[in-house]
């Protein structure tokens, strides 16, 4: 079974997405959705050298998505207020650096998606430490920065820590 359907959840999601995009349940579209759901993971499984991640702790996922949703709405209102009513001479647009503990590529990808979907913030790059004991740093652009410490604390505690739990990645520890 796993040979023909290596990632059943992904196959089901692709089929459901196909049917939602076409807004129909005609047998031809169902057959095409099933074909897409089976062929997609089969053709792309060699592109995933690590395999698909195993997501753990669904309650943490729901809490993280809830917080991110609230943050997106709050930031949307703040960015609209700045664009419509603020004096551009007082706009404090800056880059800040956030030290990252996480090394898991799937966790970092999820973190970048969460940060980039928040209006007024852009993930620009991750600067790796030149030695194993040095931390990676996320370079983040903030549209109107008032408190860099708040951003660092928010990303570390409300985004990175839950993602470490979800992907069960261990924080980086220097090897002896």
Image (cartoon, grey):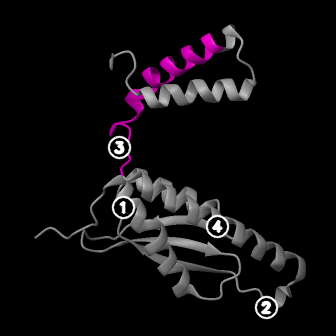
Real-space Cα separation, disc 4 to disc 1, in angstroms: 21 Å
* Residue at the disc numbered 2: 90
10 Å crowding of disc 2: few (<14), some (14-19), many (20+): few
Residue drawn at x 57%, y 66% as measured from the top left? 67
Q: Secondary structure at mark 3?
A: loop
Mark 2 and mark 1 lie on one chain; the one further toward the N terminus is 2
Judge whether 155 appears above or below 44 on screen: below
Residue 147, percent from left and from top: 60, 88
Q: Is residue 73 left or right of residue 99?
A: right
Real-space Cα separation, disc 2 to disc 4, in angstroms: 26 Å
Q: Is residue 80 left or right of residue 20?
A: right
* Residue at the disc numbered 4: 70
Mark 3 and mark 1 lie on one chain; the one further toward the N terminus is 3
- Give the number of the mark in front: 4 or 1: 4
Which residues fall within the magenta stretch? 30-56
- The residue most toward the left is 176
* Residue at the disc numbered 1: 164
Q: Main secondary structure of the magenta part?
A: helix
Residue drawn at x 68%, y 8% as measured from the top left? 28
Mark 3 and mark 4 lie on one chain; the one further toward the N terminus is 3
Please identify the quadrant where the N terminus is shown: top left
* Residue at the disc numbered 3: 54
Mark 4 and mark 1 lie on one chain; the one further toward the N terminus is 4
Real-space Cα separation, disc 3 to disc 1, in angstroms: 12 Å
- Give the number of the mark in front: 3 or 2: 3
Residue drawn at x 52%, y 72% as measured from the top left? 139
14 part of magenta stretch? no
């Amino acid at each position: 079974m796993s040979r023909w359907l290596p990632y059943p959840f992904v196959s089901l999601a692709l089929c459901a997405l196909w049917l939602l995009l076409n807004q129909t349940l005609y047998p031809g579209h169902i057959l095409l959705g099933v074909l897409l759901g089976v062929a997609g993971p089969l053709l792309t499984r060699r592109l995933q050298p690590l395999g698909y991640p195993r997501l753990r702790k669904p309650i943490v996922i729901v809490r993280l998505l809830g917080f991110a949703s609230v943050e997106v709405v709050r930031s949307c209102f703040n960015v609209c207020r700045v664009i419509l009513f603020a004096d551009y001479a007082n706009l404090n647009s800056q880059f800040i650096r956030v030290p990252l503990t996480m090394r898991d590529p799937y966790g970092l990808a999820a973190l970048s998606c969460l940060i980039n979907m928040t209006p007024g913030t852009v993930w620009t790059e991750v600067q790796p430490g030149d030695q194993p004991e040095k931390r990676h740093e996320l370079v983040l652009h903030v549209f109107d920065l008032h408190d860099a410490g708040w951003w660092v604390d928010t990303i570390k505690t409300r985004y990175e820590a839950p993602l470490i739990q979800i992907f069960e990645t261990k924080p980086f520890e220097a090897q002896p």
